[in-house]
Amino acid sequence: MYLHLGQDTVITYDEILGIFDLEATTVSKATRDYLATATKQGRVVNVGYELPKSFIVCRNKDGGTTVYISPISPSTLLKRSRSKLTNL
């Protein structure tokens, strides 16, 4: 199954390590440092040009991680995933 993150970006559910509210989590210095490091390493993908609301950490096939910055709220992403999973 796939989850649409915005624009033309979709990921599979088995790639997802976590979905986080950008506003609530960036209060923590540890989260800000994590996102800054991921950006410096080129592991961050911005999914749109709108105000970002969430970030999604995904596992790559090579064992690394990619962080997607999405304009879609975490609650909407959760609703999408639940509706897809219950329709199986």
Image: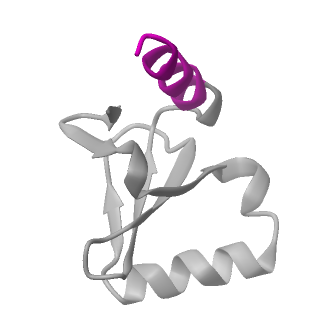
Residue at the image point whose x is 53% and y is 53% from the top: 55
User: In the rendered view, how is the structure colored?
Assistant: one colour
The question of residue 85 being in magenta is answered with yes
Q: What is the chief secondary structure element of the magenta stretch?
A: helix
Residue 66 is drawn in which quadrant? bottom left
Residue 76 is drawn in which quadrant? top right
* The residue positioned farthest toward the left in the image shown: 8
Which quadrant, please, contains the N terminus?
top left
Residue at the image point whose x is 39% and y is 88% from the top: 40
Which quadrant, please, contains the C terminus?
top left
Residue at the image point whose x is 57% and y is 32% from the top: 73
Q: Position of residue 62 (x, y in %)?
A: 26, 81
Q: Position of residue 25 (x, y in %)?
A: 75, 58
Residue at the image point whose x is 44% and y is 53% from the top: 69
Q: Position of residue 57 (x, y in %)?
A: 49, 62
Of residues 9 and 16, the one nearer the viewer is 16
Tell me: 81 left or right of 9.
right
Give the magenta part as a residue range: 76-88
